[in-house]
Image (cartoon, rainbow, N blue to C red):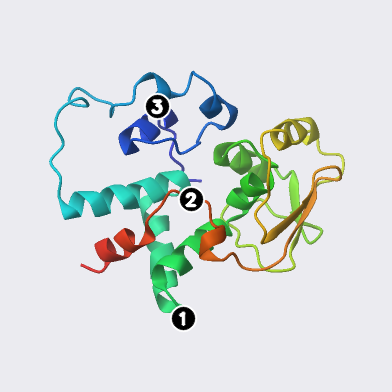
Amino acid sequence: MARDTGPQCKQCRREGQKLFLKGERCLTDKCGVERRSYPPGEHGRGRLRASEYRQQLREKQKARRYYQVLEKQFRSYYDKASRQDGVTGENLLRLLERRFDNVLVRLGFAASRRQARQLIRHGHWQVNGRRVDIPSYQLKPDDIVSIRSGSNAETTVRVATELISTVPPWLQADHDSLTAKVLRLPERDEIDAPISEQLIVELYSK
């Protein structure tokens, strides 16, 4: 399974804002962006050359790091979104939002996408009563998400639920029974991601 194992705080610092990659740590003073708000590396405090291409590239990298997907995966999502009806940028975000690992974070069942991936890969979660161990699995409307009976990760999941205050309106969660349902596809204004998808479309359209 290909994955990014590099330092996550450096990724946030590179993009100049919190991407909440480390769960609870991102809410404390230990957050890398709070401690060092400049980009990592020897020239992190140097002057940055502004350009249209740089802005578009940084937006794409930010989206890729936010959803924790690799370059080839991200390009595949874009190609799929461009073939769908509607606005390509919004289609792209909908595909990324409906990833199983991202949905667990949105529901509050995982503190971070990396933790969600681990819980999924270890077989702690089910979709419609069947075990799904693929983090990129695309959830559909009316899918039921539930923790596997007898899972030893229940305590970890319940701790994660304390970090979330609201669940997006396109999802329905029961934090007592640790079950949830996908009500419908998300609308653009319901996707709480610090991303300008139009810049990504412009980059790939060149």
Which image quadrant: the C terminus? Answer: bottom left
Judge whether 40 appears above or below 194 on screen.
above
Query: Which residue is painted at 57% across and 56% down in the image?
Result: 99
The Cα–Cα distance between marks 3 and 2, rounded to whole angstroms, is 18 Å
Tag nearer the camera, 2 or 1: 2
Residue 61 placement (x, y as % from top left): 34, 47
- Where residue 74 sits, quadrant-wise, is bottom left
The residue that label 2 is drawn on is 193
Left or right, residue 11 beside residue 28: left
Q: Tell me the SS state at disc 1.
A: loop
Q: Which mark is residue 33?
A: 3
Mark 1 and mark 2 in contact (Cβ < 8 Å)? no
Query: Which residue is painted at 57% across and 32% down in the image?
Result: 23
The residue that label 1 is drawn on is 85
- Where residue 196 sits, quadrant-wise, is bottom left
Residue 31 placement (x, y as % from top left): 46, 23
Mark 1 and mark 3 in contact (Cβ < 8 Å)? no
Residue 203 placement (x, y as % from top left): 25, 61
Left or right, residue 137 beside residue 55: right
Q: Tell me the SS state at disc 3.
A: helix
Query: Which residue is painted at 64% across and 62% down in the image?
Result: 139
Whichever of labels 2 and 1 marks the residue nearer the N terminus, that label is 1
Whichever of labels 3 and 2 marks the residue nearer the N terminus, that label is 3
Q: Amino acid at mark 3?
A: Val
Q: Is residue 135 or residue 99 the one in the foreground? A: 99
